[in-house]
Amino acid sequence: MQKLIEGIHEFQREDFKPLEGLFGQLAHGQDPETLFITCSDSRIDPNLLTRSMPGDLFILRNAGNIIPSHGAGNSGEAATIEYAVTVLGVKDIIVCGHSHCGAMKALLHPEKLTNLPSVASWLSHAETTRRIVLENYSHLGEEELLDVTIEENVLVQIEHLETLPSIASRKRRGNINLWGWVYKIETGQVFAYDVKSKQFISIAEYEIPVPEEVRKRRTSAI
């Protein structure tokens, strides 16, 4: 705790002053363009990873970067997403998994959750991920299996996102973009899901697709 208190003093003394004008503006409201959904894991810092400033990202974190699908019951996740999309009008939503994810390890080994009933219940929202992996990748070794699980879970959670009414309506109008990322803790690399190749590729090689509404505008202008 002492380390955190000292950190607050350092923040107020060294970091806040240069950004005082920005924080003054943010005190009157926020206008983030991106909702960043990731794991609660302490090794991930979305702002550090993306070099973003206060006010740039609306962040949702939980164990395993999981989004319960519509109809799975009321959840803070659904409320947060609805607010981000309907009130804040975010244009992009990123679901970001990460290497060495403890939640995904537990998903593969439910027998280890005997004394963690709440965790087991939460991970039921990733049951589709578990079945996809066990039925299609059982030939892989433990480490490779975990990597595949992390990637597949990102894609499954994006599918869950698309079931939420606030997302579905915006998707129909073509004015929201959903992205799947995986962050590799040990190297700092980020991999993005490429729809064309159906693979996660280094974000350095990733070509951002032009949204449908932009393509239509460009076509009509020719």
Image: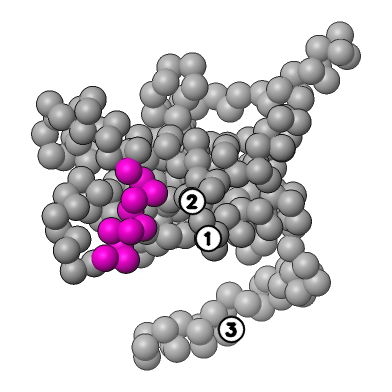
> In this view, which residue lies farthest toward the right?
221
3D distance between C-alphas at marks 3 and 2: 42 Å
Main secondary structure of the magenta stretch: helix
Q: Which residue is mark 1?
A: 75
For the point 12% across and 26% down, the residue is 139
Mark 2, other Cα within 10 Å: few <14 / some 14–19 / many ≥20? few
Q: Are marks 1 and 3 in contact (CB under 8 Å)?
A: no
- Indicate left or right for 98 with 38 as reference: left
Residue 154 image point, x, y percent: 41, 40
Residues drawn in magenta: 117-127
Q: Which residue is mark 2?
A: 72
Q: Which residue is mark 3?
A: 12
Instruction: Identify residue type, mark 2.
Output: Ala
Measured along the vertical axis of the image, is residue 167 above or below residue 62? above
Query: Mark 1: which secondary structure?
Result: loop
Residue 35 image point, x, y percent: 60, 51
Q: Are marks 3 and 2 in contact (CB under 8 Å)?
A: no
3D distance between C-alphas at marks 1 and 3: 35 Å
